[in-house]
Image: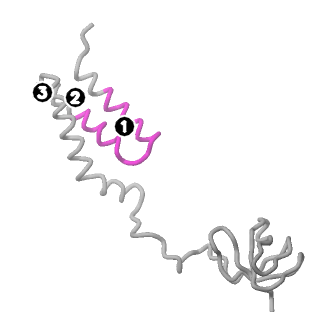
Amino acid sequence: MNFDPVLIWFLAGLALILAEFMIPGVILIFFGVGAWITALSTWMGLTPGWTSQLLTFAVSSVVMLVLLRRWFRARFFGYVEGGQDPEDNLDDLAGHEVTVSRDIAPGEMGKVQYKGASWSASSESNLAEGDRAIIVRTEGIALVVRPVS
């Protein structure tokens, strides 16, 4: 059975481009377009052998990946400069009031309720179940609280 290389390259390109939708990362699309460029060059008779076709595929895919990936990502995903500044954290919990759900003693962890969720918490003061407290800061996934004054 003799397969048409133009059809093989076209279908390979289509499969890679469709795979980009399932595995996003703006990488596979360039290999898909590279396969289509190879199909076009083969159809035009510029790349008659498998060696020239593989070379065309590899070079066109890598060149597009290197030159266009950043531009595509900026257009489709937006541009994010650097990381998030902790000072701009919109989810900062400091200053919010919580209810103690399990006693807290200095040096020991207790529990507090905040917006319906239970959080581990520590404090420099004794806090009994039912007391109200203010979140001072977060330490990992635990809260540091102080009594409401």
Q: Report the amino acid beneath label 1.
A: Ile
Which secondary structure lies at badge 3?
loop
Image quarter of the N terminus:
top left
Instruction: Locate the C terminus by quadrant.
Output: bottom right
Query: Helix or strand or loop: what does disc 1 sit on?
Result: helix
Q: Are marks 1 and 2 in contact (CB under 8 Å)?
A: no
Q: Nearer the viewer, residue 10 or 141?
A: 141
Q: Is residue 68 above or below residue 81?
A: above
Residue to which mark 1 is pinned:
17
Measuring 44% from the left and 41% from the top, which residue is drawn there? 21
> In the rendered view, would you say 12 is above or below 60?
above
User: What residue is rendered at 86% in x and 75% in y?
Assistant: 103
- Name the amino acid type tagged 2: Ala
Judging by the rendered image, the residue that carries numbered circle 2 is 39
Residue 74 sits in quarter: bottom left
- The percent coordinates of residue 34 (x first, y second) are 24, 37
Q: How is the image coloured?
A: one colour
Give how far apart the Cα atoms at labels 3 and 2 are: 9 Å
Looking at the image, tell me whether mark 3 or mark 1 is earlier in sequence order: 1
Q: Secondary structure at mark 2?
A: helix
* Mark closest to the chain's N terminus, 3 or 2: 2
Q: Crowding near pointer 3: few (<14 within 10 Å), some, many (20+)? A: some
Q: CA distance from mark 1 to mark 2?
A: 14 Å
- Real-space Cα separation, disc 3 to disc 1, in angstroms: 22 Å
Labels 1 and 2: the sequence-earlier one:
1
Which label number is shown at residue 47? 3
78 over 11 or under it: above or below: below
In magenta, the rendered stretch is 11-37
